[in-house]
Image (cartoon, rainbow, N blue to C red):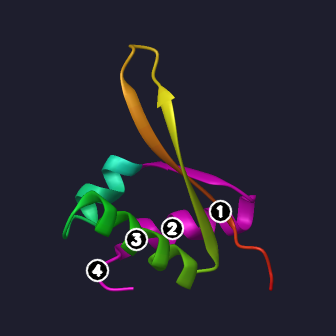
Amino acid sequence: MENAGNSVEHSARKALEAGRAEVPWLLLRNLHFRDGTPTDGRRAMEAAFAELGVQVRVVDRTMPNGTQMQWVVLTPAPLS
């Protein structure tokens, strides 16, 4: 998990402890997964969280001011 930093690890730990965590995709993209296209960044993000035992789902939400945002929902990965 290259350059994934403390916020990724913190979010993963929170998801594992609480069963769920949410982070704005734009924040993760700008801080940690900015190399390549957004698709490349998303793949890198999914791989980084998978290494930490967390699965990723991206959801679109409309904020109270009408702005559309993508949120990353983190949950513990199922045991295989």
Marks 2 and 3 sit apart, C-alpha to C-alpha, by 19 Å
The location of residue 17, given as percent across then percent down, is: 72, 66
Q: Are marks 1 and 4 in contact (CB under 8 Å)?
A: no
Q: For the residues marked 3 and 1, what is the alpha-carbon distance in whole angstroms?
A: 19 Å
Helix, strand or loop at label 2? It is helix
Discs 2, 3 touching: Cβ within 8 Å: no
Q: Report the amino acid beneath label 1.
A: Ala
Mark positioned earlier in the residue sequence (1 or 4)? 4
Residue type, numbered disc 4: Asn
The residue tagged 3 is 43
Disc number for residue 15: 1
Which label number is shown at residue 10? 2
Disc 2 to disc 1, how far (Cα)?
9 Å
Answer left or right for 15 relative to 40: right
Question: Residue 52 at what x, y percent from top left?
Answer: 57, 81
Answer left or right for 26 relative to 64: left
Q: What range is drawn magenta here? A: 1-24
Find disc 4 in the rendering and name its residue.
3
